[in-house]
Image (cartoon, rainbow, N blue to C red):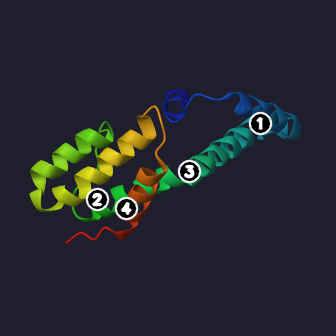
Amino acid sequence: RRQEVASNTRPLGAGAAVQVGSLRARTASTPRGPRLAWITLRFSREAAANRGDTLSRAYRRLCRRLAGAGLARLPHEGPLDYSRRIAVARPDLAERVVPLLSAYAQLRFGARQDERLFKAFIDGSRGITLE
């Protein structure tokens, strides 16, 4: 049981340590306190991760659309590897998808931010249609 719980956890940040401390204080008097604290922390972290920033949300939306077309992103794939696999599997989508995924990689991992590229990626990920 402990191993199963440990495999589903992620590293905690400094803010999470404060959350855990306050959860412990609130739940220490109940017999199920530690379990309740863990469940609360787990779901609050997942909710925060799901919100994300505009760029991440647009990327996830694009990945969901591509998955709907039979091109799901593999867990280990970054945006550039994903775009190469799409170009091989569906050359008809390559001219629309490869520039979007390249733009995302540059925006997410590049040294400087380009507002025009950001707007182009957001608009392109919203407007893409897949057959």
Instruction: Kindly identify the amino acid type of the residue bearing the numbered disc 3.
Output: Asp
Q: Position of residue 16 (x, y in %)?
A: 71, 33
Q: Nearer the viewer, residue 96 or 83?
A: 96
Q: Is residue 46 above or below residue 92?
A: above
Question: Which numbered disc flags the more N-terminal residue, 1 or 2?
Answer: 1
- Is the residue marked by circle 2 packed among few (<14), some (14-19), or many (20+) residues within 10 Å? few
Q: Residues within 10 Å of mark 3 (few under 14, many from 20)?
A: few
According to the image, label 2 marks what residue?
Answer: 67
Residue at the spot 87% in from the left edge and 40% down from the top edge: 26
The answer to which of marks 3 and 2 sits earlier in the sequence is 3
Q: Are marks 3 and 1 in contact (CB under 8 Å)?
A: no
**Residue of label 4:** 125
The image shows residue 45 at horizontal and vertical percentages of 63, 43
* Number of the front mark, 2 or 4: 4
* Residue 1 visible here: yes
Numbered badge on residue 19? 1
- Measured Cα–Cα span from mark 3 to mark 1: 22 Å
Q: Where is residue 36 shown, x and y percent of the image? A: 73, 43
* Residue in the image at 56% along x and 50% along y: 52
Q: Quadrant of residue 40?
A: top right
Image disc number at residue 53: 3
Point 23% across, 60% down: residue: 96
